[in-house]
Image (tube, grey):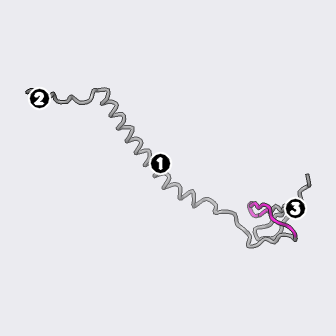
Amino acid sequence: MEQAPAPEGLPPSLRFLKGLVTVLTLTMIVGVITVVGVLVTRMPQSFASAPVGPTLPAAIVLPEGARAQAVTFGAGWVAVVTQNDRILIYSTAGALRQEVTLLPQ
C-alpha cells in the first residue's frame, strides 16, 4: 500500500494573501489601541477646561403679572422672555438691568 503524498502547503498567491491579511489585522489592532489611548489621555483635559455652565443668580424677581416663557444666558447677564412680549435682562446678582418691550406684529 502506498502512502498518501505529503501536503505541499499553500500556493504562492494564497500565501501572499495570508500575509496581507495578517499585516492588515496587526495594523487595525495598533490603530484601535492608538485611538483608545488618545481618547483616554486627551479627553479628561478637554473636560477639565470646558466651562461648567452658566452662573445663575440666587433669585430673580419678575415684575407683577409677568410669567417667564424662555430664559437665556450670556456673559454676566440672564435674559427672561415673558409671555407679555417683554425681555427682562438681569445681572448675575439678580438685579434688573434692562427691560425691552417687543412691538406687536
Left or right of 93? Residue 2 is left
Residue bearing the label numbered 1: 35
Of badges 2 and 3, nearer the viewer stands 2
**What's the magenta region?**
65-79
The amino acid type, in three-letter code, at marker 1 is Val
Q: Earlier in the sequence, mark 1 or mark 2?
A: 2
Q: Earlier in the sequence, mark 2 or mark 3?
A: 2
Q: Which mark is residue 103?
A: none
Instruction: Give percent across and percent down for residue 32.
Output: 44, 47
Q: Nearer the viewer, residue 6 or 49?
A: 6
Residue 9 found in image quarter: top left
Q: Nearer the viewer, residue 24 or 48?
A: 24
The amino acid type, in three-letter code, at marker 2 is Gln
Point 77% across, 64% down: residue: 78
In the rendered image, residue 2 lying in the magenta stretch gets the answer no
Q: Quadrant of the N terminus?
A: top left
Circle 2 SS class? loop
Q: Earlier in the sequence, mark 3 or mark 1?
A: 1
Residue bearing the label numbered 2: 3
Circle 1 SS class? helix
Residue bearing the label numbered 3: 84
Up the image or down, 68 lies above or below 16; here it is below
Tell which residue pokes out farthest to the left in this image: 1
In the rendered image, residue 72 lying in the magenta stretch gets the answer yes
Left or right of 43? Residue 26 is left
Q: Residues within 10 Å of mark 1 (few under 14, many from 20)?
A: few
